[in-house]
Amino acid sequence: MNYERSRELYGRALSVLAGGVNSSVRATKPYPFFIERGDGAHVIDADGNKYLDYVMGYGPLLYGHDLPEPVAAAIQSHAADGPMYGAPTEVEVELAEFVARHVPSVEMMRFVNSGTEATVSAVRLARGHTGRDKIVVMQGGYHGAQESTLVEGDADNPQPSTKGIPEEFAQHTLPVPFNDPAAAEAVFAEHGDDIAAVLTEPILGNMGIVMPVGGYHETLRELCDDHGSLLIFDEVITGFRVGGLQCAQGKFGVTPDITTFGKIVGGGFPVGAIGGRAELIEQFAPSGEVFQSGTFSGHPVTMAAGLANLEYAAENDVYDHVNSLGEQLRGGLRDILADQAPEYTVVGTDSMFKVIFTRDGAADRGQQCGAGCRQDSNCPHYDHCPKTGADVADADTERWERLFWQSMKDQRIFLTANQYESQFISYAHTEADIEETLAAYAEAL
Ligand code: PLP
């Protein structure tokens, strides 16, 4: 394949953009391909190469690159009316009403402009509400590029995970292993009176997709209730992707106090949101005393895109389609791995999937999982799935990025270049696409 134009663009980009990109994960080696346009489930790069896309903008694109007619019409009409006003519009009320009707924990919302902004605001709200400073997070969890959660280590020794964050900030964050109720109980036993909130993704979506074991979220719920702390589910990835319109909290039957959203709720435009019980969300200014504000928040084009997106999903077979393709793909991948690479693991649920290159942990566990089940001891794959971020931390990232990702790219399949980040199926994908993808995996592996 010819990548001349992408190489030339990357050369120019390196002179004017840090690392040549605007988000670090995009800097694939030896240089990224620059996308010119989308076409259904495909993207076409600057050299005219066409790829089957499972990155889907890192999650926001439920429909792929060709929007259903009502969604496209809503976006065009709102953009044509003028991009934004700095005053309220009806469409932001309609989108909040839609989310409140469908997501169990949500009575009231505040829209912002990114998932990061949503988790920043949710943490501030929890601290403001409780008058406490400490936040419990999961090792291997991700909540965007924000100071309170870019923290590694454990609850006894939390450290900033990047330069630029004061060590004192990290002292307020307590990382615990996901799916370990005893560790959560221990951190509450020691710090319970100081914990403002537990902040967790319902499914770890940035660490190779780790499902919750049965009862884990219920334990977090109880610990928060017993200690007057808030439970925050970060549904930036899982919101309106896992569990359909009820999101992962509906699928798992555990209701958090606060939920953060991003990605799909904005229909492909920059978005974030914080939702929860009215008495909590009302504590944001101006009804409350927790400052929160944003020039672009509730942007009318984003709100129109998000609303039309979700209304279309409510009225059509969108989730049935993407979830059944997810099962087809994960099932096919399990068969391929059993034959060619039994030390690797298939993970995922609904329309999320990933093949994890764990060579030791997975081999010990034998067969692969990826059944799309909620992990519990009744699941036939229970012993074989990763349970914590650490279970997948030893995955062979070097092999994934240098050999596997490149081989898939050469076969014109576009995957997230990072070993740990989820891949997504859209409404535009077909059964034939899945068969083509399985053939490419078989070849690459
Ligand atoms: N929370 C989760 C679970 C995410 O996966 C992400 C981004 O991928 C974020 C928060 C941050 O969202 P954004 O990149 O829109 O700031």
Image (cartoon, grey):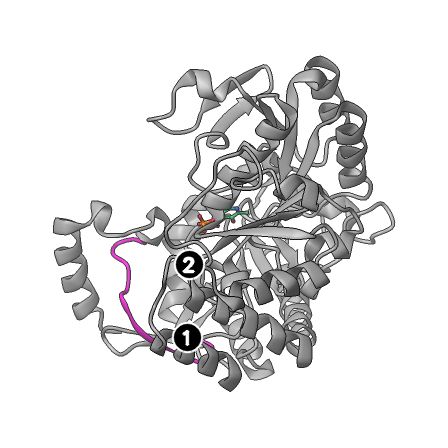
- Residue at image position (40%, 51%) is 401
> In the image, 198: left or right of 268?
right
- Please state, as top left, top right, bottom left or bottom right, where the N terminus lies in the image: bottom left
- Residue at image position (57%, 35%) is 125
> In the image, 419: left or right of 224?
left
Position above or below: 329 against 99: below
Residue 156: x and y, percent? 59, 14
Q: Quadrant of residue 189?
A: top right
Q: Quadrant of residue 80?
A: bottom left
Residue 295: x and y, percent? 37, 51
- Residue at image position (19%, 49%) is 17
Residue 247: x and y, percent? 68, 58
Q: How many residues crowd around disc 2 within 10 Å: few (fewer than 14), some, or many (20 or more)?
A: few
Position above or below: 103 against 233: below
The residue identified by callout 1 is 78
Residue sitting farthest toward the bottom = 69
Q: What amino acid is at disc 2? A: Ala
* Distance CA(mark 1)–CA(mark 2): 14 Å
The mark nearer the N terminus, 1 or 2, is: 1
Q: Nearer the viewer, mark 1 or mark 2?
A: 2
Q: Quadrant of residue 231?
A: top right
Position above or below: 241 against 129: below
Classify mark 1: helix, strand or loop. Answer: helix
Classify mark 2: helix, strand or loop. Answer: loop
Residue 410: x and y, percent? 36, 69
User: Principal SS element in the magenta part?
Assistant: loop
Residue sitting farthest toward the right = 378
The residue identified by callout 2 is 87
The residue segment tinted magenta is 28-41
Front one among 27 and 409: 27
37 inside magenta stretch: yes
